[in-house]
Amino acid sequence: MKIEIKADKRSVQGTGASRRLRRESKVPGILYGAGKDALPIELDHKDLWFKLKTEAFHASILDMDVAGEKTQALLRDYQMHPFRPLILHVDFQRVAADKKIHMSVPLHFVNADVSPGVKIAGGLVEHVMKELEVTCLPKDLPEFIEVDLANLQAGHSLHLSSLQLPPGVEAIVAKGEDPTVATIVIPKVLTAEEEAAEAAATAVVSAADVPTTAQKTKEEEAAEAAAAAAAAPGAGKEAKGGGKEEKKEGKEKK
């Protein structure tokens, strides 16, 4: 699959110039690599926006036309605005036909629905890896790598060593490692007793966290009684009168 993209040489640089380009629906970028000087470029925002939405654009050798000069390149990086649908900058790398490149290639999982772990055991497929780092010559770069799950059993895993990589493509992994690509797990099914126990535990926790209506009524009654006693008329006078009587009794005793 060939993907073509057009760009123009960018004569002005800097923050202010980049802002002016974005106002004109252009995206500032850079083209570098292959032993040549870095070249500032600008691209049409709308065209680049839709190309970025395609998976192949991120993992393919691109045929780039820069002001009539043809070159092959890879998308290496791009920056997006934090919240606006706006591409701020994009980086491309030239490729040389005789030099190997490093790329992240997407994995496409097939035949999951007919695998014994799913069809017979009712398991669920977990994609541990979604892309794979590879190295190869530009002509050998695959658009994606297919992962066949047709024979995967429940509770088993598919490792990198089981994948059939295209000719000339090597996976980039640490020496001696064989990472898991996918696995099939059986979801836990609760019995009626386990469901009842969980429901009871939830009810107990809820009851402890939220006071009942009866508890609330008792607390409210106690608070109201205390407030009524404090606000009763003559309560303060009786307390003062009691004090005077105690003083009189003391004098009579003397």
Image (spheres, rainbow, N blue to C red):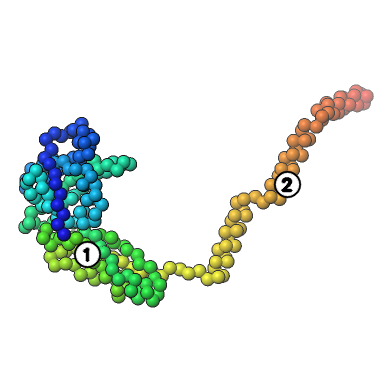
Q: Residue at x 59, y 54 (%)?
A: 206
Identify residue type, mark 1.
Answer: Ile
Helix, strand or loop at mark 2: helix
Q: Position of residue 139 (x, y in %)?
A: 11, 60
Counting other residues with Cα less than 10 Å from the Cα at mark 2, is it few (<14), some (14-19), or many (20 or more)?
few
Which one is earlier in the sequence, the residue at label 2 or at label 1?
1
Name the residue located 21 percent from the left edge and 33 percent from the top edge.
20
The correct choice, above or below, for 25 with respect to 196 in the image is above
Residue at image point 13% right, 67% down: 167
Residue that carries the numbered disc 1 in the rendered image:
145
* Element at label 1: strand
Quadrant in the picture for residue 83: top left
The residue identified by callout 2 is: 218
**In the image, 71: left or right of 211?**
left
Find residue 91 and report its horizontal and vertical position in percent. Answer: 17, 45
The Cα atoms of the two marked residues, 2 and 1, are separated by 70 Å
Is residue 144 toward the left or the right of residue 157 in the image?
left
Q: Position of residue 121 (x, y in %)?
A: 40, 75
In the image: residue 69, left or right of residue 193: left
**Looking at the rendering, which quadrant does residue 221 occupy?**
top right
Label 1 neighbour load within 10 Å: few <14, some 14-19, many 20+: some
